[in-house]
Amino acid sequence: AQRVTQPEKLLSVFKGAPVELKCNYSYSGSPELFWYVQYSRQRLQLLLRHISRESIKGFTADLNKGETSFHLKKPFAQEEDSAMYYCAIRGNTGKLIFGQGTTLQVKP
Amino acid sequence: DTGVSQDPRHKITKRGQNVTFRCDPISEHNRLYWYRQTLGQGPEFLTYFQNEAQLEKSRLLSDRFSAERPKGSFSTLEIQRTEQGDSAMYLCASNLAGYTDTQYFGPGTRLTVL
């Protein structure tokens, strides 16, 4: 079955601390993975996707097929990073399968 | 604003009533998706259209739910005989298949069934 697991509901860090939001997936075939972010009172928006290998707003994510993980990382958290983060996998028909989400709280 | 729009943004209804939501995708996008999000959960796929054809429906979509995209542009999602368990945020997303996989989301319609 295709599934995405985000084990942490809440991650609270201080400004300037490193951040790692965990994501594990199960999928048969070649997965396409995404991180979406939802800031307060805003719509869900794409943060990054693994095939582009970009760094967006200082965030990176590496696909580890051996561990079936796609953890999101940032070396130095900023207060404006506080948001809800969703890991998602693209299913074989194009639909997205989301994890439960992790709330990132960056304290001053 | 040329993004995905949804109407209404909020809907409060009584159990047993019918409700209809509308989604207007980005104009050139040929795929349109509906998702449902309940409190504390990530969005869950309901159904999607390519142009006017409904190509997939989730098992979450009971017989009380119906979706249409009659001219391949906007879409409607209707829930008949609403139940309290239907209370959720209903999200619409669109993309241009074959060009970009990135799905662009609307602001959602929050449904409360009393």
Image: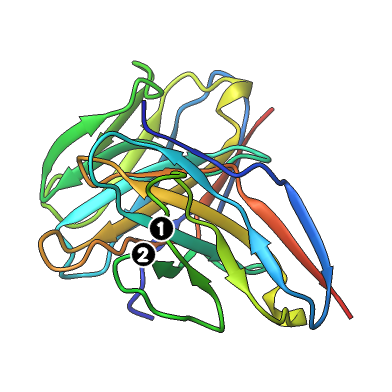
The residue marked by circle 2 belongs to what chain? A
CB contact under 8 Å: marks 2 and 1: yes
Where in the figure is residue A3, as x and y percent of width and height?
44, 34
Q: Is residue B67 left or right of residue A80?
A: left
For badge 1, the amino acid type reads Leu
Is residue A34 or residue B67 the one in the foreground?
A34
Residue B65, image quadrant: top left
Q: Is residue B30 left or right of residue B67?
A: left
Q: Is residue B12 left or right of residue A106?
A: left
For badge 2, the amino acid type reads His
Q: Is residue B114 above or below residue A101?
A: above
Where in the figure is residue A61, as x and y percent of width and height?
48, 66
Sort mark 2 into few (<14), some (14-19) or many (20+) by Cα contacts within 10 Å: some
Which disc, if any, is residue A78? Answer: none
Q: How is the image coloured?
A: rainbow
Taking the spot 17% from the left edge, 57% from the top edge, the residue there is B73
Sort mark 1 into few (<14), some (14-19) or many (20+) by Cα contacts within 10 Å: many
Secondary structure of the residue carrying numbered label 2? loop
Q: Is residue A8 left or right of residue B57?
A: right
Is residue B3 or residue B81 the one in the foreground?
B3
Which disc, if any, is residue A50? Answer: 2
| Residue identifier under label 1 | A63
- Looking at the image, the residue that sits furthest to the front is A66
The residue marked by circle 1 belongs to what chain? A
Where in the figure is residue A8, as x and y percent of width and height?
71, 46
Residue B43 visible in the displayed image: no
Taking the spot 72% from the left edge, 78% from the top edge, the residue there is A77
Secondary structure of the residue carrying numbered label 1? loop
